[in-house]
Image: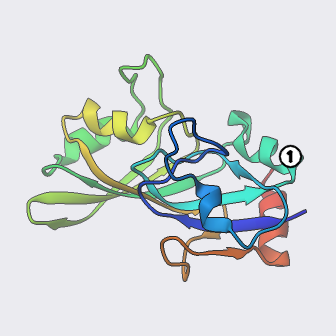
């Protein structure tokens, strides 16, 4: 099997094809001969860590909600949410999509030009979950970047670049599921 870590830039679909001809993540993997599939998704305007593999069993395990694989995001939101709002979100709320999120960890990292940079750790990953969390507290997501998926970190991989996971990283992914 092949296991690839891609730093997905904004403006690419996490899809194998697009009927509208928009850029897809596979466009960034031109040198890869084997067919690989994304483990989970990052929406068109999101960026960061995306694992691609042809190991279907591991993909299923890593994305199954019962496995609660931790994902870490650095999120820039409009304005500065109060600690009370962050506390409410961290305890779990029902979003506008009627999805009840599980408790999560949210940290205020810094404030830049009147906007907050948050670190959010979740153990689920519903479609647009982080963006809806921002909307829930009235602070729209301006930038969203996944920096970690389970034990795998984005460290050292620039936007648009990829690398193969090493044996230890593959072992660590299999160990958590």
Q: Is residue 87 above or below residue 119?
A: above
Residue placed farthest to the bottom in the image? 156
Residue placed farthest to the left in the image? 114
Within 10 Å of disc 1 (Cα), the crowding (few <14, some 14-19, many 20+) is: few
Q: Horizontal and vertical percent for residue 70?
A: 60, 52
Q: Is residue 60 above or below residue 175?
A: above
Quadrant housing residue 7? bottom right
Q: Horizontal and vertical percent for residue 8?
A: 52, 62
Visible residue check, residue 60: yes
Residue placed farthest to the top in the image? 98
Q: Residue at x 44, y 36 (%)?
A: 129
Frontmost residue, 101 versus 112: 112
Frontmost residue, 175 versus 160: 160
Left-right relation of 62 to 134: right
Q: Residue at x 56, y 72 (%)?
A: 154
Q: Quadrant of the N terminus?
A: bottom right
Element type at marker 1?
Answer: helix
Left-right relation of 35 to 18: right
Q: Residue at x 40, y 41 (%)?
A: 130
Q: Horizontal and vertical percent for residue 81?
A: 18, 47
Q: Which residue is mark 1?
A: 56
């Amino acid at each position: 099997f092949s296991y690839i870590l891609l730093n997905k830039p904004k403006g690419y679909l996490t899809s194998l094809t697009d009927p509208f001809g928009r850029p897809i993540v596979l466009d960034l993997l031109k040198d890869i001969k084997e067919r690989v599939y994304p483990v989970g998704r990052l929406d068109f305007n999101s960026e960061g860590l995306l694992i691609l593999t042809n190991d279907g069993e591991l993909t299923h395990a890593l994305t199954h909600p019962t496995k609660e694989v931790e994902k870490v995001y650095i999120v820039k939101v409009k304005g500065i949410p109060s600690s009370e709002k962050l506390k409410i979100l961290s305890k779990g709320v029902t979003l506008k999509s009627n999805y009840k999120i599980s408790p999560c960890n949210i940290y205020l990292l810094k404030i830049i030009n009147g906007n907050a940079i948050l670190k959010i750790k979740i153990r689920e990953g519903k479609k647009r979950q982080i963006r809806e969390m921002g909307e829930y507290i009235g602070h729209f997501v301006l930038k969203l970047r996944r920096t970690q998926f389970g034990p795998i970190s984005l460290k050292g991989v620039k936007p648009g670049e990829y690398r193969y996971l090493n044996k230890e990283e593959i072992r660590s992914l299999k160990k958590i599921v």
